[in-house]
Image (cartoon, rainbow, N blue to C red):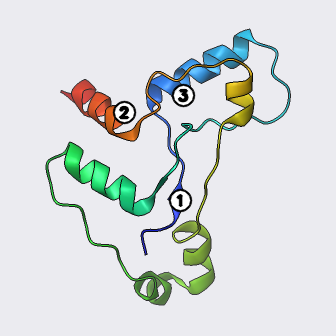
């Protein structure tokens, strides 16, 4: 449907977060995700815009379920994951690329 949430993180922020965690005393599990999760539709539209291509139409859920089995598809492809980096932010980490559009442009510019 495209309404499923997905978390993401720019590679620069992932590396920066790991360095930050090595230098700071943070206890417990830490989510390495950008602070701005997006829906699958938002991600697809942003990626299409970044590569100057039309966004791909969403695939109806019954197609992959027929191919791969309902439970597997529900858990891996159709599940919504709106994960936030609360512990990372609470520890003082500042994201360089918290916005998906900027992160995609930076990744594409790096590929050059």
Which of the two discs, 2 and 1, labels the residue nearer the N terminus?
A: 1
Horizontal and vertical percent position of residue 112: 18, 27
* Cα separation between marks 2 and 3: 12 Å
Which residue is situated farthest in the right direction here? Answer: 27
Which residue is situated farthest in the top direction here? Answer: 23
Q: Which residue is mark 2?
A: 103
Q: Nearer the viewer, residue 75 or 58?
A: 58
User: For residue 1, which quarter of the picture?
Assistant: bottom left
Which of the two discs, 1 and 3, labels the residue nearer the N terminus?
A: 1
Indicate the secondary structure of the residue bearing disc 3: helix
* Above or below 13: residue 51: below
Residue at position x 57%, y 37% in the image = 35
Image marks 1 and 3: residues in contact by CB distance under 8 Å:
no
Q: Which residue is mark 3?
A: 14
Residue at position x 68%, y 38% in the image = 31
Around disc 2, counting alpha carbons within 10 Å, would you say few (fewer than 14), some (14 to 19), or many (20 or more)?
Answer: many
Horizontal and vertical percent position of residue 19: 62, 15
* Cα separation between marks 1 and 3: 19 Å
* Cα separation between marks 2 and 1: 17 Å
Camera-near label (1 vs 3) is 1
Residue 5 tag number: 1
Horizontal and vertical percent position of residue 50: 22, 43
* Above or below 12: residue 68: below
Q: Is residue 51 left or right of residue 91?
A: left
């Amino acid at each position: 449907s495209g309404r499923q949430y997905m978390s993401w993180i720019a590679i620069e922020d992932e590396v920066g977060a790991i360095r930050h965690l090595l230098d700071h005393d943070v206890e417990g599990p830490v989510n390495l995700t950008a602070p701005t999760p997006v829906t699958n539709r938002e991600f697809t539209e942003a990626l299409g815009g970044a590569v100057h291509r039309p966004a791909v139409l969403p695939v109806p859920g019954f197609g992959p379920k027929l191919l791969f089995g309902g439970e597997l598809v529900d858990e891996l492809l159709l599940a919504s994951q709106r994960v936030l980096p609360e512990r990372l932010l609470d520890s003082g980490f500042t994201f360089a690329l918290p916005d998906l559009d900027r992160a995609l442009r930076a990744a594409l510019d790096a590929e050059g």
